């Protein structure tokens, strides 16, 4: 019988499958169900800075529409956003605490950051609530023409710096692949003292409704095809970074889990797979992993983790190849 | 509405009004500059608690009253939350009939001496004045004139006490003796009801007494109004918390047939940032209550207050202004306002900001506190502040403050007052589970009658609006009184 | 009118006053307190209602003189009037039949503990009370406590009465030897802190009744704020009782010292006039 235990962020997981931040992990009840379904760890649904602002906005708007409330400049409403933020944060912290009291698997709190300023004291409170680790989702699309590479990248380091100074629990970050020198960036980030990196953040994909001439969202759920870029970079960076690596996006079956671990991932995060195929998919994936390990004669994850990474693999050049050469020859 | 327009038109056509209009050319009127309020010298007044504004002298008042053009369409009235008949009271001043002017005011406004002092006229009546909207000149000083007429009446000793109808023996309970409660009491007692006002504190007047400092609204002015109500037959019971000392049900058993809840928005809000519970950090309610209600600044009174040399007040409303100016008077070397938006966007009355600046208050706009630090006795001694810049406007049209990364710095403070707003007092809603309340804890009422979800229980003022103004509370009170009157008439009929 | 109908000096610094307050007497339950202001220039202070007689319309207050106001109360006599008394404030104690209740009272905290111990006993619980005081003279209400407890353990700092030691020693003895279902502790903040730590070792749910500085007592000013389970609570409207294991006692003790300097100066000034 294969032993699926793995270590991620210094935490002991009973298996390498983590359910990522999503609607699946937004309530204590759901989290309890996911634990029952076999998850190795949970990332609680991200708390978003923008979400708080939007909620404050809508509360304010409701207030103005109620004409018993005094006026736009009312003293009482002046700091309303603060209270809404406090409420949202308290609810989040409450959820962390309740999830911890009702489960035994590691609970990772996810925070969506765009600046280091808001979250410093918050990170401390999340730690107090009992979160086993923090996942900072730093999602900065380099779309601002005025910001240079150095500037954008500096924000990442500032955020990490601030949060690390506030908490003792392990901190991981989830990043996008949009860096001009991704390898160097991942390497530098891994040396900051964070315990893990999650590759890659999946951005909201825009689409157009050409009949109503409005924007809409495309592919809310990932597809297996999206896995390969993550696979590439996990393989390239495995063994070259000072922290753990977790793979996410497009992991829909047990085979994909195996592939990512072979590439060097210490753990994987899944979301869409469960949306599409239900919670039972988790057991199926774990079952596939186990059978494969038994077949191949691996008793422990450590025995095959990273075997096919660039560092350890037999064909290192394969990962760097981005163009097709000689009509699909060489790499089968 | 048409009815009102008709009445206004009729009144305007009366002989005395026509005469006044003819007595001076419009151009002469509009050429006059707006009157300047007599004020105590800033340096002197920053060391005393006497009223800053000294009031207009008679000649000044008459002269200012002349500026009013007695418009055919008085837009100023639309700016008044309770629709005071502004041209009428101003013209009485012009005619020299000051007592009559006060009487006109009291037709709509129970406490004109209070409103003349604390209403934010610059966003109410005066903002709709013809001078402002059409001539782009300073509006008629409606607030100063209201205060003048009310003060004149009070000082003359000839206070008009409205006639009280025959007693009908019906008992009504007013919960809370702030502006809303006083307004309800004033109307209901006039109509012959047996009115008892229950007040939780040991003094009557609510926020008028504990919240607004002496240098803005002397307590004795409030006491004169309360005395008037007593003369009319209103009973006041202090140290009585409805919901604790007795419940509404208990009072019903004692024969009270209708209730008005005017318990206000007394729950202080804090920012919940690290260190906010250190000694020396107060809510504005605590600070002002100690000083205004308990006279803590005086050694003769037992209540202590701690007000240091480096005082920071967080917030930008009238409460913040009151707190910071009080700290100056208590001997602070530095009295600072820390507000996260610009000075123009502060919700405080323009006059308060101006007076504060003159008194030497430091305005640190576009700043926000992040954390407080203390000495080893737990007494605050430092705070970390962050600079802000203004981003996109939010729903209110005000630009959103965005923190500037890396801009934090330290400020030495030994006293901090958090004046970021108040929420509705939860005691009554907690004691009456059937009472419908909003998400913010405000009691929901029918806007016409001010009746809550419980028949016979009415509400108004801050408990319904969240922290608002004195004039709105009074307006609510008068509406509620009318609503209660109807309710009781129907109840009596159906007996 | 809030007339004092009875006065009894319990020891050199503690007095018992019975005051007319019919409405409060009717509504009062164990755990409630009042805010009292003696005269025009007095300050408002909280005092636990030690007892009440709804038929006579009176409430009993037990006061230890530690400052200006409490000292003035100590010197008042039968027939005097306390200008302002408002209540009942706070949430009443939740009295349930749980089995064995360990009550731990220190100093003047024994006064508010008495009605609670009595109520638990009347509800059918086994009540063991540990009373603590610095010395024999400062120990109050021993007989009254004995009347409503199955066992009483007395601790004095100097051993002048009962056992020598602190309240935590007394508690420890009980917790070691038998299962306790609930603990209640009232007394100086530092005492409650250590009492809570003691009961926590044995995983016994514990209630502490807090005595913060107050001004209005109705939730209006926040002077009495305390951190419980990471959140800010107001002792006057959310308490005065809280889960002792969740209270940030260090912060509370620090806040209690907020007016120390001013109060000491005022008390010294006052003592000169006495």
Image: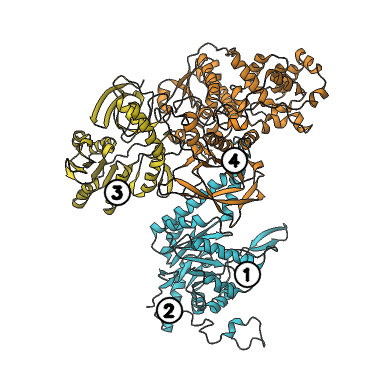
Choose mark 4 or mark 2, whichever is in front: 4
Residue annotated with mark 2: A302
- Which dot, 1 or 3, sits closer to the camera? 3
**Do callouts 1 and 2 mark residues in contact (Cβ within 8 Å)?**
no
Residue B136: x, y in percent?
A: 77, 33
Same chain, labels 4 and 2? no
Look at mark 3 in the image and give the residue it sits on: C194
Residues at marks 1 and 4, common chain? no
Mark 2 or mark 1, which is nearer the start of the sequence? 1
Which chain did the renderer colour yellow? Answer: C
Residue at image coords 58%, 24%: B478
Disc ID at residue A178: 1
x, y (%) of residue A8?
45, 70
For mark 4, name the chain. B
Q: Which residue is mark 4?
A: B316
Chain with colour orange in the figure: B
Rendered shade, chain A: cyan
Q: Give the residue displayed 60% in from the left and 65% down from the top.
A: A154
Depicted C191 relative to depicted C215: above or below: below
Quarter of the image where the N terminus of chain B is located? top right
């Amino acid at each position: 019988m294969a032993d699926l235990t793995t270590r991620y962020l210094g935490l002991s997981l009973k298996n390498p499958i983590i359910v990522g931040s999503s609607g699946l992990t937004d309530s204590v009840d759901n989290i309890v169900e996911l634990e029952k379904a076999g998850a190795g760890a949970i990332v609680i649904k991200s708390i978003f800075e923008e979400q708080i602002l939007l909620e404050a906005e809508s509360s304010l708007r409701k207030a103005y529409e109620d004409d018993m409330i005094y006026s736009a400049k009312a003293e009482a409403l002046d700091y309303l956003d603060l209270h809404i933020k406090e409420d949202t944060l308290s609810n989040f912290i409450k959820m962390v605490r309740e999830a911890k009291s009702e489960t035994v698997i590691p609970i990772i709190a996810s925070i969506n950051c765009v600046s280091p300023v808001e979250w410093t004291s918050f990170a401390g409170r999340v730690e107090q609530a009992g979160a086993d680790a923090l996942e900072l989702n730093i999602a900065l699309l380099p779309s601002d023409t005025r910001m240079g590479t150095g500037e954008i990248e500096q924000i990442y380091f500032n955020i990490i710096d601030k949060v690390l100074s506030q908490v003792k629990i392990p901190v991981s970050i989830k990043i996008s692949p949009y860096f001009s020198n991704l390898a160097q960036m991942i390497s530098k980030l891994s040396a900051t003292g964070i315990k893990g990196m999650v590759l890659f953040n999946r951005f909201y994909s825009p689409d157009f409704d050409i009949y109503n001439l409005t924007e809409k969202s495309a592919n809310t759920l990932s597809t297996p095809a999206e896995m390969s870029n993550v696979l590439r970079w996990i393989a390239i960076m495995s063994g070259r970074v000072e922290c753990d690596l977790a793979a996410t996006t497009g992991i829909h079956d047990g085979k994909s889990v195996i592939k990512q671990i072979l590439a060097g991932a210490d753990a994987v995060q899944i979301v869409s797979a469960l949306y599409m195929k239900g919670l039972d998919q988790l057991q199926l994936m774990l079952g596939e992993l186990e059978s494969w390990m038994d077949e191949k004669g691996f008793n422990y994850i450590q025995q095959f983790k990273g075997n096919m990474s660039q560092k350890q693999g037999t064909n290192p050049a394969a990962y760097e190849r981005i163009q097709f050469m000689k009509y699909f020859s060489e790499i089968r | 509405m048409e009815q009102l327009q008709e009445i206004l038109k009729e009144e305007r056509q009366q002989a005395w009004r026509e005469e006044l209009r003819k007595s001076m050319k419009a151009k002469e009127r509009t050429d006059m500059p707006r009157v300047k309020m007599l004020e105590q010298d800033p340096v002197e007044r920053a060391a005393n608690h006497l009223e800053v504004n000294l009031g207009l002298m008679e000649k000044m008042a008459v002269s200012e009253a002349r500026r009013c053009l007695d418009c055919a369409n008085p837009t100023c009235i639309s700016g008044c939350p309770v629709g005071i008949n502004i041209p009428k009271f101003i013209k009485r001043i012009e005619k020299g009939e000051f007592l009559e002017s006060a009487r006109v005011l009291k037709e709509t406004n129970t406490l004109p001496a209070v409103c003349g002092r604390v209403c934010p006229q610059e966003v109410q009546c005066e903002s709709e004045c013809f001078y402002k909207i059409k001539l782009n000149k300073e509006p008629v000083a409606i607030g100063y004139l209201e205060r003048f007429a009310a003060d004149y009446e009070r000082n003359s000793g000839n206070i008009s006490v409205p006639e009280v109808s025959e007693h009908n023996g019906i008992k009504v309970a007013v919960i809370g003796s702030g502006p809303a409660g006083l307004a309800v009491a004033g109307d209901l007692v006039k109509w012959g009801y047996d009115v008892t006002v229950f007040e939780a504190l040991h003094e009557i007047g609510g926020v008028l007494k504990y919240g607004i400092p002496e240098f803005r609204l002397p307590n004795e002015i409030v006491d004169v109004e309360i005395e008037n109500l007593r003369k009319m037959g209103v009973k006041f019971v202090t140290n009585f918390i409805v919901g604790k000392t007795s419940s509404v049900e208990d009072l019903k058993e004692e024969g009270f047939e209708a209730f008005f809840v005017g318990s206000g928005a007394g729950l202080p809000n804090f920012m919940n940032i690290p260190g906010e519970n250190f000694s020396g950090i107060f809510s504005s309610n605590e600070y002002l209550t100690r000083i205004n209600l308990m006279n803590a600044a005086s050694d003769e009174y037992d209540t202590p207050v701690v007000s240091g040399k480096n005082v920071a007040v967080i917030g930008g409303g009238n409460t913040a202004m009151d707190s910071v100016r009080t700290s100056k008077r208590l001997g602070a070397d530095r009295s600072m306002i820390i507000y996260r938006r610009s000075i123009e966007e502060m919700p405080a009355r323009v006059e308060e900001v101006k007076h504060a600046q003159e008194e030497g208050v430091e305005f640190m706009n576009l700043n926000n506190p992040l954390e407080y630090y203390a000495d080893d006795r737990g007494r605050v001694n430092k705070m970390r502040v962050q600079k802000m810049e203004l981003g996109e406007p939010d729903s209110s049209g005000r630009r959103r403050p965005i923190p500037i990364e890396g801009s934090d710095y330290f400020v030495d403070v030994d006293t901090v007052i958090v004046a970021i707003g108040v929420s509705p007092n939860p005691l009554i809603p907690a004691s009456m589970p059937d009472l419908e309340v909003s998400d913010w804890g405000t009691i929901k009422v029918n806007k016409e009658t001010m009746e809550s979800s419980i028949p016979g229980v009415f509400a108004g003022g801050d408990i319904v609006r969240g922290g608002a103004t004195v004039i709105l509370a009074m307006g609510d009170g008068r509406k509620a009184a009318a609503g209660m009157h109807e309710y009781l008439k129907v109840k009596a009929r159906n007996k | 009118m809030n007339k004092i109908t009875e006065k009894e000096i319990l020891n050199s610094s503690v007095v018992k006053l019975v005051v007319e307050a019919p409405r409060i007497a009717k509504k009062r339950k164990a755990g409630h307190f009042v805010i009292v202001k003696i005269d025009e220039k007095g300050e408002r202070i909280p005092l636990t209602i030690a007892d009440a007689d709804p038929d006579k319309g009176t409430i009993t207050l037990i006061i230890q003189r530690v400052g200006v106001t409490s000292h003035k109360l100590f010197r008042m006599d039968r027939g005097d009037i306390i200008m302002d008394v408002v209540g009942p404030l706070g949430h009443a104690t939740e009295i349930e039949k749980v089995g064995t209740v360990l009550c731990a009272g220190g100093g003047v905290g024994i006064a508010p503990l008495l009605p609670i111990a009595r109520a638990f006993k009347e509800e059918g619980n086994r009540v063991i009370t540990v009373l603590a005081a610095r010395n024999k003279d400062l120990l109050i209400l021993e007989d009254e406590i004995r009347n409503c407890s199955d066992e009483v353990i007395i601790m004095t700092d100097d051993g002048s009465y009962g056992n020598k030691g602190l309240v935590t020693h007394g508690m420890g003895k009980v917790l070691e030897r038998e299962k306790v279902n609930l603990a209640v502790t009232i007394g100086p903040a530092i005492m409650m802190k250590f009492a809570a730590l003691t009961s926590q070792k044995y995983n016994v749910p514990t209630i502490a009744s807090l005595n913060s500085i107050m001004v209005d007592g109705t939730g209006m000013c926040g002077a009495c704020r305390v951190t419980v389970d990471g959140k800010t609570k107001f002792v006057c409207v959310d308490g005065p009782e809280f889960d002792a294991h969740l209270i940030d006692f260090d912060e509370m003790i620090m806040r209690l010292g907020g007016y120390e300097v001013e109060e000491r100066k005022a008390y010294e000034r006052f003592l000169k006039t006495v």
